[in-house]
């Protein structure tokens, strides 16, 4: 079955008693036991809840995984994955990383003896060079936030297998609709489902998929022990969002392609980062490995003063953090999403005071371009 169909079908078979087409919201903390030593399969909602389970089964199917897990946020999901490691372990991480993930690694998990090396994971040789005797895993963003570099997952996974390292892929920007990391050799995929999966800027959620059933059991043990699970209402909203993932993604990336081309020709724009543009260094690889180039664009304006002008004058495109929803959003990574990246690293990467990040929604593309034009030229 094609992924667009699988996405629509999530939860459909759940309620055999009434035949409800969408999975019901089981807003309950606990479940009655039919008898001593007996269970319906559900005992307590931290350990398992049918609405959450429908979502977890659904994301596992979309990613070709043994199991899926739903968490209260993308950060909660990543936190649970870091519990797979012990004091003294070292991880190799994408350098151009979401600022919140960097904060979690450097300010919290470093206190518990984990160490992290930040490398350009779109350069497999750099990943190889960073391996230490204590390295246990490579954590990559499949398409990076905010500079949109694309990792060669197959090459990194070959490297990980030969060095006995776990490969964890944050696939938030692409989703299983565009790329399935587990098919390309990753062991675990993680998502801020807040973004494209839930898709409507109305829910904060995180999802994890695990390929190996034994590793999945350990992840479940951590999910249940820590308890940062997604509640039934938000599980339902995320499931509903996923049903339209394919058509939203198609429209969003079509809009993004047109906007990137328009920005690239604008005299006040000095640089455009969008992997769909032919001059992007990862364009050819991404065209082979991914169903599309996604709907995130980063661009530099020719003067810092223009940053504030654009953020204040765009009216259709909202000046707000987050991404991936149906509404277009624009943000200034240096002081918002990436403020927690050390300033030297930000400077080296090009996350500077003229860089803006645009999350393209499903609006009519002519209206989006007109909004950008009047903000740039106004
Ligand atoms: C690539 C990526 N991973 C993880 C996260 C964290 O997800 P959440 O905000 O749902 O906790 C984000 C948030 O922006 C992100 O962009």
Image (cartoon, rainbow, N blue to C red):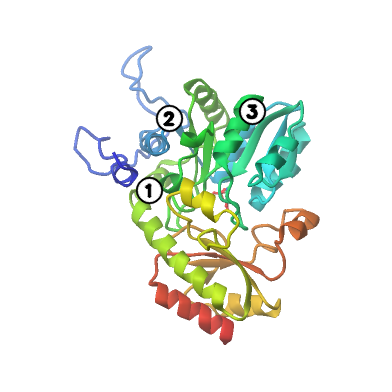
State which tag comes first along the sequence, 1 or 3: 3
Q: Which mark is residue 242?
A: 1
Residue at image point 42% right, 37% down = 63
Real-space CA distance between mark 1 and mark 3, rounded to the nearest whole angstrom: 31 Å
Residue at image point 60% right, 81% down = 267
State which tag comes first along the sequence, 3 or 2: 2
- The residue singled out by tag 3 in the image is 165
For label 3, the SS is loop
State which tag comes first along the sequence, 2 or 1: 2
Q: Kindly give the residue lying farthest to the left in the view shown.
A: 18
Asked if residue 173 shows in the view, the reply is no
Within 10 Å of disc 2 (Cα), the crowding (few <14, some 14-19, many 20+) is some
Q: Which mark is residue 48?
A: 2
Q: Mark 1 against mark 3, which lies toward the viewer?
A: 3
Within 10 Å of disc 3 (Cα), the crowding (few <14, some 14-19, many 20+) is some
Left or right position of 125 against 284: right
Task: Return the residue nearer the eye: 55 or 354.
Answer: 354
Real-space CA distance between mark 3 and mark 2, rounded to the nearest whole angstrom: 30 Å
Residue at image point 74% right, 38% down = 116
Q: Which mark is residue 111?
A: none
For label 2, the SS is loop
Real-space CA distance between mark 2 and mark 1, rounded to the nearest whole angstrom: 20 Å
Q: Mark 3 against mark 2, which lies toward the viewer?
A: 3
């Amino acid at each position: 079955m094609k992924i667009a169909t699988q996405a629509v079908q999530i939860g459909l078979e759940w309620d055999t008693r009434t035949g409800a087409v969408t999975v019901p919201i089981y807003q309950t903390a606990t479940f009655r036991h039919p008898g001593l030593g007996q269970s319906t399969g559900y005992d307590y909602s931290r350990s398992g809840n049918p609405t959450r389970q429908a979502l977890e089964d659904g994301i596992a199917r979309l990613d070709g995984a043994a199991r899926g897990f739903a968490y209260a946020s993308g950060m909660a999901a990543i936190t649970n994955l870091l519990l797979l490691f012990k004091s003294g372990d070292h991880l190799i991480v994408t350098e151009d990383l979401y600022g919140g993930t960097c904060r979690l690694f450097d300010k919290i998990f470093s206190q518990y003896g984990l160490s992290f090396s930040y490398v350009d994971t779109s350069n497999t040789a750099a990943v190889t060079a960073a391996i230490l005797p204590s390295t246990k895993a490579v954590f990559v963003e499949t398409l990076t936030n905010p500079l949109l570099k694309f990792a060669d997952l197959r090459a990194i996974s070959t490297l990980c297998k030969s060095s006995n390292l776990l490969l964890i892929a944050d696939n938030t920007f692409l989703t299983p609709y565009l790329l399935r990391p587990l098919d390309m050799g990753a062991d675990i995929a993680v998502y801020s489902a807040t973004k494209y999966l839930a898709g409507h800027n109305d829910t904060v959620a995180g999802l994890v998929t695990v390929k190996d059933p034994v590793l999945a059991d350990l992840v479940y043990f951590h999910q249940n022990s820590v308890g940062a699970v997604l509640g039934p209402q938000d599980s339902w909203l995320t499931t509903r969002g996923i049903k339209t993932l394919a058509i939203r993604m198609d429209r969003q990336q079509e809009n993004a392609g047109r906007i990137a081309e328009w920005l690239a020709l604008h005299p006040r724009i000095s640089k455009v980062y969008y992997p769909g543009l032919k001059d992007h260094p990862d364009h050819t690889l991404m065209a082979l490995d991914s169903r599309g180039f996604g709907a995130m664009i980063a661009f530099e304006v020719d003067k810092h003063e223009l940053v504030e002008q654009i953020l204040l004058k765009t009216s259709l495109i909202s000046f707000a953090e987050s991404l991936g929803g149906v509404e277009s959003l624009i943000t200034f990574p240096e002081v918002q999403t990436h403020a927690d990246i050390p300033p030297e690293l930000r400077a080296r990467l090009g996350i500077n005071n003229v860089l803006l990040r645009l999350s393209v929604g499903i609006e009519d593309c002519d209206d989006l371009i007109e909004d950008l034009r009047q903000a740039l030229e106004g």
